[in-house]
Image (cartoon, grey):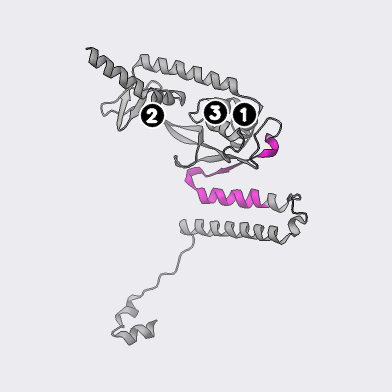
Amino acid sequence: GTESKHRRRGGDLKTRGTELGSAVTGSPLTATTGKKSIVLSSETRKELAKQAKVTKEERRAQIDERHKYLIARLADGIDLSEQQVEEAIISDDKFQLIEQFFASSGLKKLLFFYQDVLQQKLNASLRSDGSTNSLIQKKLFITMGSTENFTGTCAFFLRTSDKVITASNISQEVNFGAFDCTNGNILQGLEFFLSQIMIPALKSQQNWGAVKEGLKNSQIQDFLYSVDKFVGTLSSSRQNIEDKIQLTKVDVDIYISNLQNPSDYITAG
């Protein structure tokens, strides 16, 4: 009676953070604790959906010109509307990373993946084996870059200094880029990004800051040579992985069968 009520309520409280995180990211159906997956009641789902809506609106109210700058770049870079990008950002459980990126001496990079993810249907019912109906949908989400497999498009923002990011300096202090790694072909995506976008941009750069000679400076020439060489290595690695470079097969049995003593081995060597 009373003891089981307390136990159940305690369980709800322990999983509330996980459940709310799930709700905010758009799938308020199950909460995972350890290895167990708990199916949430319709009342709990409604409560979590209500909390998620409040959280989203609080975040929407925090959006300022800096966020709008990021949203506009992302919309252009991955071909989504600004409304879609805003909705994805305020629904993301890593929303706080944006503020950490803006802060003085904050995060050096802010990463977004746009790719297929497995999401549960909102009206999913539990199957006899304990699983639920789910479907694959494209989703834009904030990532640290080390916890999810990368299979789609990566959009990134990089800081150029430790200054606090403001509405007036964001266009100078923050660089944006994106590269496509559809089907997880990361080497090809990175090779294309560097060879077709970054290297041409660097070679046409006029202002190199404190380096007055610009492209004539030997250190800059060495740097550009190193980047070119790196792209060449990427290309070779990709072709090796794709089996485009094949070594000629040699039948060594003939040679091995004639090796009888150490002097034969030395001669063969």
Identify which amino acid the numbered label 1 is placed on.
His
Residue 187 x, y percent position in the rendering:
52, 51
Segment colored magenta: 170-199
Q: CA distance from mark 1 to mark 3?
A: 9 Å
User: Which residue is at 76% across, 50% downward?
Assistant: 206
Residue 160 x, y percent position in the rendering:
65, 42
Select label 2 or label 3 by which is in front.
3
Residue 30 x, y percent position in the rendering:
35, 25
Task: Please name the residue that numbered disc 1 is placed on.
Answer: 67
Q: Residue furthest top?
A: 1
Mark 1 touches mark 3? (CB < 8 Å): yes
Task: Please name the residue that numbered disc 2 is placed on.
Answer: 134
Mark 2 lies on a secondary structure that is: strand
Q: Quadrant of the C terminus?
A: bottom left
Q: Which comes before the other along the chain, label 1 or label 2?
A: 1
Residue 89 — which label? Answer: 3
